[in-house]
Amino acid sequence: MTQVKPMRADARRNYERLLKAAAEAFAEHGEGASLDDIAKRAGVGSGTLYRHFPTRQALLEAAYVDRIEAMAARADELAAQLPPGEALDEWLYEVCVGTVQVRGMKALLGSAVTDGSTAALTACGTSMKGAAARLVEAAQREGTLRADLEPVDLLRLAHGVATASELADPRGGQLRRYLSVLTDGLRPQK
Amino acid sequence: MTQVKPMRADARRNYERLLKAAAEAFAEHGEGASLDDIAKRAGVGSGTLYRHFPTRQALLEAAYVDRIEAMAARADELAAQLPPGEALDEWLYEVCVGTVQVRGMKALLGSAVTDGSTAALTACGTSMKGAAARLVEAAQREGTLRADLEPVDLLRLAHGVATASELADPRGGQLRRYLSVLTDGLRPQK
DNA sequence: GCAAATCCGGAGACTCTCTCCGTATTTTGT
DNA sequence: ACAAAATACGGAGAGAGTCTCCGGATTTGC
């Protein structure tokens, strides 16, 4: 699923530089980092940036695919070593931590689970939904997760908890407490 | 707690016009509406806008105080006609609906419950926290609400649920379902 | 090595925010 | 009623970003 035609050498070089510059800039200034500034850091014209990454989302995603894939992979690790319900809880926690700690991640994960967004069919959205689906199915089978929720619902709710926790403390000090409300609410009620 | 010195006549007139224009613009374009455009709609120079409302938050708050106060008052109405736990649930639902339906409200309520924000001590923040506090205390006394949550925590969590629900559907179609996860999680667990 | 294909750069047109200060309006004092 | 003092107005313009456009530079294929 790589380029049909391989990229021209200079194009590939600039692409890589942009990715590196973007990662730095997003880490430093958050999702709102200046795009022209990223181009400058990469030693590239702004036209080049916009050609490779037509939207901020596209750049954000390209800069963070690795982390996203790691998160998704982590779901299976947890599934292998914990009972389904606990695996899900722990995974949601880790997702929230990533959302809160990695600047720019929130916007990316948010748009990945936004219904109707053109970004809905992005790679990272697919990975995360897939990972969530595996945990969700197991937990529902086990009976420790309400049956009326789909994988994407959990991702959205986790996003909401991360948001709430940022209101209290940008560094996530309240995350565990807020998340526990969510995880309690995820259990089937008698 | 009105102006110490009464405002000059033209100042008051412009203030009112700005408020009306702002309400329209926020309703139309959301919290990000152009401020210069609001000034233009009001038939006023941009300097005048910034003099009356130094920040976007200030304008947002001034434009929506009424609604916020109504929300806060609604808490007491509900408390008077429902058992504490249900009153709280219903109030949270109404707050979320307002958050989702009234464009610009989300930003306002969000900053009102943000710790460390200078906006933390705004009038609307105070009203909402006060209203929440009354419901929370009653519900905790009754034993239908976890003891480890403060009023402001609930406002933040509601904000998170509203956010999650917007990811699914900007018109709030999933709000009830998502909120039910929160309200279930708010019960003390055995 | 050369033509064709591809990609680059950055000027520039827009949009938005926010400040500054000469000018205009209102209020006050008599 | 009128001048002086107090107060408020307005909009030009600086600054920061976004995003496009296309003449010119690079790379590739042969």
Image (cartoon, coloured by chain):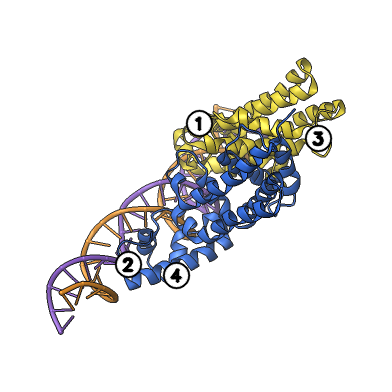
Chain colours: A blue, B yellow, C purple, D orange
* Dot 1 and dot 3 residues touching (CB under 8 Å): no
Amino acid type shown at disc 1: Ala
Secondary structure of the residue carrying numbered label 2? loop
Secondary structure of the residue carrying numbered label 3? loop
User: Share a chain, discs 1 and 3?
Assistant: yes
Q: Which residue is mark 3?
A: B189
Residue A139 location in percent, x, y?
66, 41
Foreground tag (1 vs 2) = 2
Amino acid type shown at disc 3: Gln
Q: Which residue is mark 1?
A: B27
Foreground tag (3 vs 4) = 3
Work out which quarter of the rendered image holds the C terminus of chain A and state it. Answer: top right
Residue pictured at 51% horizontal, 58% vertical: A65
* Dot 1 and dot 4 residues touching (CB under 8 Å): no
Q: CA distance from mark 1 to mark 2?
A: 48 Å
Q: Chain of mark 2?
A: A
Task: Using the image, determine if residue A62 lies above or below residue A106.
Answer: below
Residue C28 location in percent, x, y?
67, 34
Secondary structure of the residue carrying numbered label 4? helix
Q: Which residue is mark 4?
A: A17
Amino acid type shown at disc 2: Pro
